[in-house]
Image (spheres, helix red, strand yellow):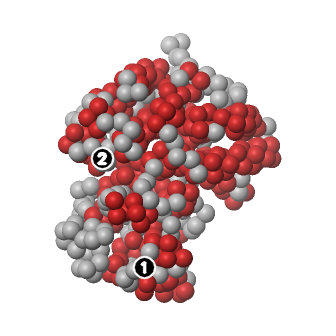
Amino acid sequence: MQGTSLSKRGIVAAWRSIPRAATIAVGACVAMVATALAAASLIAPAPLRAEGGSAGSMTEHSSRAHLGVSTCAGSTCHGHSVPDGNPVRQDELLQWQQEASPTGAHSRAYRAIVEPRGQAIIRRMGLDSAGIRNECLGCHASPGAVKVSEGVDCETCHGAAGGWISSHYTVGKTYRRDVSQGMTDLVNPKTRAKVCLDCHFSGEGQGQFVKHRIMAAGHPRVSFELDLFSTLQQHWNEDADYAQRKSKSNTMRMWAVGQAEAVKRSLELFSQPARANDGVFPEFYFYDCHSCHRRIIDGEQDSVSAVPNPGRPIQTGMPPYNDENMIMLLAAARVAAPDLAATFDTRSKAFHRAMGEGRGAAVSAAQGLRQTAEALSDRFAASSFTREQTFKIMDTIAGDAISSRLTDYEGSVQSVMAIDTLLNGLVNQGMVPQGSAAGLRVQINQAYAAVRDPNQYKPFAFRRALSGAIGSIRGLR
């Protein structure tokens, strides 16, 4: 992974309800988070260059509906300099603009294009201004924005404000009223996942599909975990008032639904003929990066570095489909939806197998797998995820049936983020004491360290580190 830094989750808000100082551990690594957030933070902070043009691909109607950051920036609304508002902090704009934190990454999204690394990618791809609009602004600016220089602004996530702004600040209004007027319901985990996936995974909008060739030009690998990314971008307080207006977030539900929606999105995109190929080649974006990006040694001292994966019934030498979210979804299903788990497992194996049979068979298998992922998403969205279930999911991830599938870097990254997220959820729900959880930071960091460098990744060493972390967490039960 490129352009990464240390302890992103610990520094930003690893466990939101634990004092932050208790979660920061020098030397802990969550490098994969930085690269997965790269659509908004490729470049180190620098003064924003003046740029006021409108996004050429946006319609006149959407430009009218999209009002821009200034609409939200009043000192009595979200543009206050200190977080002392009621019922919201009122310094949300300041949080969105933070220069030294991933919390401000969305505001820096357009800047990533105009700074050196973004410009280098553009040169390698041979993009002109029209190409930049078509290939980059779908994620590095807000659809419908008046000023693309504002990057991923408020309305990218919360919805174009033209329909709901007039009632948003009125006395006695409710969150549900805002939603009825067109605000995006980000409290709903399925809705939030779909919004985030458009850029942090890939979407169907213009410039929202991350092809392999853009990664070959220098763009970081795309990865996604809904609750972790929500934590990194959090600019609100989940206090009693928030719980009354919107309900308290359930970290475990958010994580599980995010995994299901990521699987759905991947299979939906794969099934589209326009996304399937890049010239005479298949679109390599869908495949596991490190199954091909391995050291090649041609000689008597060569050795095969690939490890057999029981979840992928494919022939040696075939590039496997990136199944990092499938592995995590199966772990969640075995605990929270056991009646669907066997079907999902069977269909995921059938999908991998069909990849060796031809495009038609693979698309057919993808549709069946997507339907099961949809059913799991619906089930999880309606589930509360108990303390016992959460511990069982972590145990399942580290257990033989799932850990034996952690043969490649991508799946291992997802698993350690999952353990961190689920433990965080237990703390947030008051199911595990803060002090006890904080004491496990060392073990979590050791698991992160085992996936610090993709070029040094060793599956069996990672499994030992993950098992050690789970062994310590198990003591909290």
Residue 17 marker:
2
Give the crowd class for mark 2: few <14, some 14-19, many >=20 residues within 10 Å.
some
Location of residue 269 by image quarter: bottom right
| Residue 463 visible, this orientation | yes
**What residue is at 23 percent from the left and 79 percent from the top?**
75
**What residue is at 65 percent from the left and 29 percent from the top?**
311
Give the crowd class for mark 1: few <14, some 14-19, many >=20 residues within 10 Å.
few
**What residue is at 71 percent from the left and 33 percent from the top?**
342
Q: Is residue 308 left or right of residue 233?
A: right
Location of residue 358 by image quarter: top right
Question: Given contact means CB atoms under 8 Å apart, are the residues at marks 1 and 2 in contact?
Answer: no
Q: Is residue 452 left or right of residue 412?
A: left
109 above or below 388?
below
| Residue 214 visible, this orientation | no
Which amino acid is tagged 1? Lys
Q: Nearer the viewer, residue 42 or 218?
A: 42
